Image: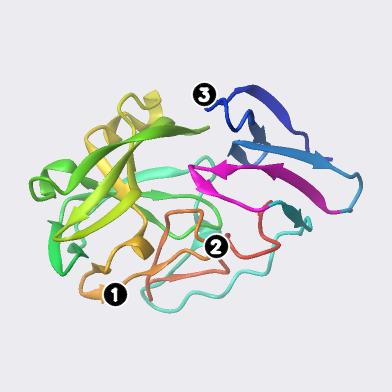
Amino acid sequence: MRRFVTLCPTDDPERSAAVGRTTEGPVVGFSLTCLGGTAPWTWAGWSVNGYPRRCGSVTMSRRPTPERPGAGQESVWDYPRPPRLESTSNDIEVVLGGLVVARTSAALRVLETSHPPTYYLPMSCFVDGALRPAGGGSLCEWKGQAAYFDVVGGDAVAERAAWHYPTPTREFAEIVGHVALYPGAMDRCTVDGEVVRPQPGGFYGGWVTSTVVGPFKGDPGTMFW
């Protein structure tokens, strides 16, 4: 049976929620209750990573059957947990408000079991004014405490759509000075010219391209993958 542990209260008195952690990772602003055995988990609260989430239930599920990767593809079920951080020379471009707000061929990828890669771009590759500090934060059990940015492009503002780790854990020290973002909150993100699809579910920040196969964590019923 999985356990839920309350760590500390949130800093938002209106929410009066808990910061918790399952054996699969952190849950911010939620309270989880296991009904036992193979029964569904239930949860109640206000937000995860600052995004509202309704109350509901999720059914615990076993590890799925991985899709077989083809030539030049990676399976997310071959990625490790704890996750691995690696550099990439892929050409990455981010567009918001009709403008290119970031472009780089020197990003980092975080690779974790069941997740498509999350790309971390150097802050220096963003145009001036594209990253605007935003309030709040969240905790990653692997990387540490995250802080958020609004992303600004032209007349468009994607609120709290990017995050970074000012003082990450020792294992992820290289991630300092790099920013990840939700591709679904941008006009488009591309990797080597291919338009990225966001990781299912809207919570995680993975980038799905034709070079990775799943199934991917994020859809209903995948919470404990």
Label 2 or label 1, whichever lies nearer to me, is: 2
Residue 218 rendering spot, x and y as whole percentages:
57, 60
Task: Answer with left or right where residue 127 lies relative to residue 147.
Answer: left
Q: Quadrant of residue 129?
A: top left
- The answer to whether marks 2 and 1 mark residues whose Cβ atoms lie closer than 8 Å is no
Callout 2 secondary element? loop
Q: Which residue is mark 1?
A: 195
Span highlighted in magenta in the image: 40-54
Label 1, label 3: how far apart the Cα atoms are: 37 Å
Residue 96 rendering spot, x and y as whole percentages:
21, 63
Q: Earlier in the sequence, mark 1 or mark 3?
A: 3
Number of other residues with Cα within 10 Å of mark 2, as a class: few under 14, some 14 to 19, many 20 or more: few
Residue type, mark 1 in image: Val
Number of other residues with Cα within 10 Å of mark 3, as a class: few under 14, some 14 to 19, many 20 or more: some
Q: Which residue is mark 3?
A: 11
Task: Reply yes or no: does residue 43 show up in magenta.
Answer: yes
**Residue that appears at 39% across and 29% down:** 171
Residue type, mark 2 in image: Gly
Q: Which residue is mark 2?
A: 201
Asked if residue 143 shows in the view, the reply is no
Q: Earlier in the sequence, mark 2 or mark 3?
A: 3
